[in-house]
Image: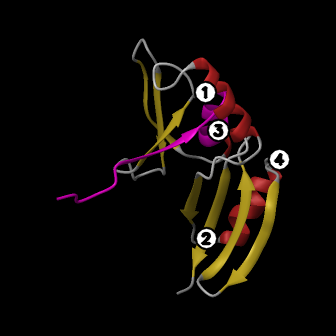
Amino acid sequence: MFNAITHSQIYVLDQDEALDFYVGTLGLEVGADVDLGFMRWLTVSVPGHPERQILLERPGPPAMSEETAQQVRELVTKGAMGGSLIFSTDDCHGTYKTLRDKGVEFTEEPTERPYGIDCGLRDPFGNSIRFTQPKT
């Protein structure tokens, strides 16, 4: 049976802009950036953890018709696709300050929760991102 999750996927509207945000701003690493002809396979991961990749996929053919892709793009922009990413950090307040100083706009400031401290933001396309400092 299964022994790991190796890839997760979120939709982005512009893969170059996504690369700049996820690598340049959030500090993730490029796992793969391959032109497959029918699509660009672009993945990122947390530094030092290449075993878990995030596919930054642009909605469109061949996975879906252009009409459906346009509907998906509209939903992504509204933050209504339901996909999200949750990262962990050793210092939620410090990470928040670093990213805020880089111009990242947050949807929620660091907040104490039963499981630790966490906060929220959206990527440039509307996808939900959270990061959590787990309670020790």
Q: Label 3 neighbourhood size at 10 Å, few (<14), some (14-19), many (20+)?
A: few
Badge nearest the viewer, 2 or 1:
1
Q: Badges 4 and 1: C-beta atoms under 8 Å apart?
A: no
Residue at position x 34%, y 54% in the image: 5
Picture residue at 62% right of the left edge, 34% below the top: 12
The residue that mark 2 highlights is 132
| Residue type indicated by callout 3 | Gly
Q: Position of residue 57 (x, y in %)?
A: 53, 32
Which residue reaches farthest top? 37
Give the residues drawn in magenta, as a range: 1-24
Q: Kindly indicate whether the residue at mark 2 contacts the one at mark 4 (C-beta within 8 angstroms).
A: no
Q: Earlier in the sequence, mark 3 or mark 4?
A: 3
Question: Which one is in front, 80 or 106?
Answer: 80
Q: Is residue 136 above or below residue 22?
A: below
Label 3 sits on a secondary structure element that is helix
Outermost residue toward the left in this view: 1
Q: Label 1 amino acid?
A: Thr
Q: Nearer the viewer, residue 82 or 135?
A: 82
* Residue for badge 4: 103
Q: CA distance from mark 1 to mark 3?
A: 30 Å
Q: Amino acid at mark 4?
A: Gly
Between the residue at mark 3 and the residue at mark 2, the CA separation in whole angstroms equals 20 Å
Q: Is residue 90 left or right of residue 5?
A: right
Quadrant where the N terminus lies? bottom left
Question: Which is nearer the N-term, disc 1 or disc 3?
Answer: 3
Whichever of callouts 4 and 2 sits on the residue coming sooner in the sequence is 4
Viewer-nearest of discs 4 and 1: 1
Name the residue carrying label 3: 24
Q: Looking at the image, tell me whether mark 4 or mark 1 is earlier in sequence order.
A: 1
Circle 1 residues within 10 Å: few <14, some 14–19, many ≥20? some
Nearest-to-viewer mark from 3 and 2 = 2
